[in-house]
């Protein structure tokens, strides 16, 4: 039987020395790893700096190319803006004519037109005003319907007709028949003889012969007005057509001069002189 006669302190001291060797080895490995990571990081940093310097050169070349392209675009902008302005001015020459032709194609023959004018109010709205003469209230109603048939019409208003048709007055104690009379005439009597005399008086009061109204019968070449029994009416039609006049000064100023940014012609002004068409009565 073998007895362990070594003291406890001797065995613990040996174990402590072994732990010191292990700790030293771990520390040495940590230092070596830190040094390795530092060297790798420095290498990666140097590589990234070299890559960035090479790309900076490419970026400088790209910026120089872009600056040159912008300079070329700025020069072409002036030509492009002027060309579009010229095209807009040429196309505008026929806008009023085309608009009037479209409106007049829907004007009925019984509306004796005296004048027509157009005023642009926005890029999608134009107001056309027509002045002319009609004979009856039926024509007054039908004329509005005819103008509503214009494809781009959004509103139609009318004014000027004076109603002169015969209508049945309110019944009174003296007049229980209610015969139609015109505005301003006295109600007819219920007595047949008196009513006949009233009708004779009203007929005698009607205008006849040469009345010298509306310049009809005049030898001078003047515009003809309303004939007897006719009314002058004004029709206003709102269309979605754009007939604004190009404004060269505003268009060029919007581009900022020769070196300014490009912009299509978007300056429009009021209609030029002669935008309203006028013709004598027929």
Image: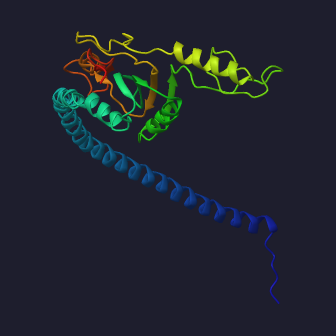
The x, y position of residue 253, in whole percent, is 27, 16
Query: Which of the 4 quarters of the picture holds residue 21?
Result: bottom right
The x, y position of residue 33, in whole percent, is 48, 56
74 lies left or right of 172: left
Q: Is residue 22 above or below residue 130?
A: below
215 lies left or right of 252: right
Q: Identify which residue, 275 or 137, lies in the foreground.
A: 137
Q: Identify which residue, 65 or 164, lies in the foreground.
A: 164
Q: Identify which residue, 68 or 133, lies in the foreground.
A: 133
Residue at the location (75% across, 65% down)? 12
Residue at the location (22% across, 39% down)? 62
**Residue 20 in sight in this render:** yes
Q: Quadrant of the N terminus?
A: bottom right
242 lies left or right of 165: left
The x, y position of residue 182, in whole percent, is 61, 21
Q: Quadrant of the C terminus?
A: top left
Residue at the location (48% across, 33% down)? 139
Residue at the location (52% across, 14% down)? 204
Q: Identify which residue, 66 or 266, lies in the foreground.
A: 266
Q: Is residue 40 above or below residue 72?
A: below
The x, y position of residue 194, in whole percent, is 69, 18
174 lies left or right of 227: right
């Amino acid at each position: 039987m073998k007895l362990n006669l070594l003291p406890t302190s001797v065995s613990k001291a040996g174990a402590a020395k072994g732990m010191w060797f292990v700790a030293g080895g771990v520390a040495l490995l940590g230092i070596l790893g830190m040094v390795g990571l530092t060297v790798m990081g420095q290498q990666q940093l140097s590589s990234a700096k070299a890559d960035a310097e090479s790309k900076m050169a490419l970026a400088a070349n790209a910026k120089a190319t872009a600056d040159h392209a912008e300079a070329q675009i700025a020069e072409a902008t002036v030509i492009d803006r002027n060309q579009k302005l010229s095209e807009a001015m040429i196309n505008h020459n026929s806008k009023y004519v085309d608009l009037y032709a479209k409106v007049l194609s829907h004007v009925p023959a019984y509306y004796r037109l005296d004048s027509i004018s157009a005023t642009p109010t926005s890029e999608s709205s134009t107001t056309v005003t027509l002045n002319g003469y009609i004979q009856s209230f039926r024509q007054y109603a039908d004329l509005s319907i005819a103008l509503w048939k214009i494809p781009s019409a959004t509103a139609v208003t009318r004014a000027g007709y004076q109603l002169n048709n015969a209508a049945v007055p309110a019944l009174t104690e003296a007049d229980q028949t209610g015969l139609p009379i015109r505005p301003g005439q006295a109600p007819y009597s219920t007595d047949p003889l008196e009513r006949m005399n009233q009708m004779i008086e009203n007929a005698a009061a009607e205008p006849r012969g040469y009345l010298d109204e509306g310049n009809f019968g005049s030898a001078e070449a003047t515009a003809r007005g309303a004939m007897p029994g006719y009314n002058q009416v004004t029709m206003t039609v709102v269309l979605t057509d754009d007939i604004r006049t190009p404004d060269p000064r505003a268009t060029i100023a919007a581009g900022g001069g020769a070196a300014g940014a490009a912009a299509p012609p978007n300056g429009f002004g009021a209609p030029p002189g002669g935008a309203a068409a006028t013709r004598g009565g027929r």
